[in-house]
Amino acid sequence: MRLKNIAFILLLATTLAGCNDTLDSVDISTVKNKVEHPLPARRIAEMQKKNMPRTSPIMIRIFKEEGVLEVWKAKADNRFDVIASYQICAWSGKLGPKVKEGDRQAPEGFYNLTPAHLNPNSKYYLAINTGFPNRFDQAMGRTGSNLMIHGACSSSGCYSMTDEQVLEIYAFARDAFKGGQTSVQLQAFPFRMTAENMARHRNSEHHDFWKMLKVGYDNFEVTKRPPEVNVCEKKYVFNQQTDASGKLGSAEACPPMSTPPALAMALASYEKTYDVAYEKAVKKLDGMVWYEPSEAERKAIVADKRKGRDLAYAPTGTSLAAGKLMKEEEFAALMQKRTATPNKPAQPAVAAVSSRPGTAAERMKQDRLPQAAGSPAPAQAPAPAETQVANTEGTATTVPIPAQNPLAYAAPQIPDDRKKPFWKFWAKE
């Protein structure tokens, strides 16, 4: 019964996500200047209510599985809050990163969007280039080009919105750049990286990659500010400080690094709560496998949305709505059936749950996120200026009050001696 409830909640979340922001009320034919078209009055009123300057920095978050794109905006206290949530009209492929040109996969990772990434002349109404491949993608040998957030609701590796939606998203970015922001962080995730979702996808071939992304996800959840992102040893590193001689090369060995003490304390508290929730979720999902649907299966459940539209309009639906929890035996039987051909007997299929060695308890222990290398023990961390915020599990977490975030106004760079590093805002001088 619990498993049925989980599936129902996931489906309900998908139905509600972005339902108030489809913007179908906007008549595109009346827009005279799409590049300078202002944000609607309701958005301006909401920004005023949340104490967000009109041209303050923004950040974009994408969650593939539920098909949601969120715009977050800096408040006067320099913490970010969500200002808009949109239901993605079309994304191609399945969960997992883009690996090579032509694989139809939409990117996952952390990307920097500059004014040069805005395309006002896109044949898909308006477009924002995601910046794929980034330094991490390049270090991994991944290829692909022209991966966009654009209109027209048709995707071959992009995140496609309706024209009405991309008009507004473009306006958010345009206004932020006018306000002085030079680099907007795009965080593209397979799903919200909660304990429940990580447990549900614990057997995926992409699990290790997603654990790496989760470190950045957690940093943002704790601080509500875009993390400083770097790459070394072919992996993402977040909010790490190095000495003056430490250089971060995408494929080179990471230099000695450490998490700022105050941030380490906050992350340790967050992860402790997460571990408890993850253990509970794994036990609840024991013996069950999440079946991730194909793009065709996602399209089938939203086929009615195409009625009366141009043929190019191709919504793809969400993985949550088309996927389902299955018993291990049912999943194995389904996979075995799919491998059978008239000239080739079906091969015994092993459920995804068994794709990683060890017992369920051992795998659960492996899945817990380790503390960042070089992080000081929480007990030894000094006490900075603090404030209380709620983490994703609803408990209070102590984090320092930051000054202006330089990363929100400038492209992330390895700081030199003339610039005050980001982490200085997390520790006393």
Image (spheres, grey):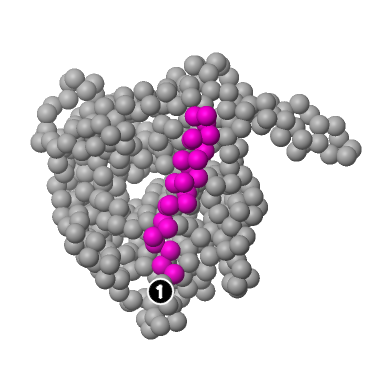
Examine the rendered structure and indicate whether residue 393 appears above or below residue 144: above
Of 269 and 2, the residue lying toward us: 2
Q: Quadrant of residue 354?
A: top right
Q: Give the residue drawn at x 38%, y 84%.
A: 32
Where's residue 326, x and y in %? 61, 32
- Please state if 233 lies on the left or on the right of 307 as rendered: left
User: Label 1: how many residues lie within 10 Å, few (<14), some (14-19) or many (20+)?
Assistant: some
Q: Is residue 228 left or right of residue 67?
A: left
Q: Residue furthest front?
A: 1
For residue 252, say whether it is visible: no
Q: Is residue 248 above or below residue 269?
A: below
Q: Taking 379 as reference, is 389 above or below it?
A: below
Residue drawn 24% across and 41% down?
223
Q: Name the quadrant of the C terminus.
A: top left
Where residue 280 appears, x then y in whole percent? 42, 23
From the image, tell me which residue sits under label 1: 26
Residue 226 vs residue 304, the one in the foreground: 304
- Magenta stretch mostly in which secondary structure? helix
The residue drawn where x is 19% and y is 59% is 49
Task: Tell me: residue 137, above or below residue 274.
Answer: below
- Give the residues in magenta: 1-24
Residue 277 in picture, x, y percent from top left: 38, 26
Does the magenta portion include 4? yes
Q: Secondary structure at mark 1?
A: loop
Look at label 1 and name its amino acid. Val
Q: How many marks?
A: 1
One can see residue 274 in this view = yes
Is 75 magenta? The answer is: no
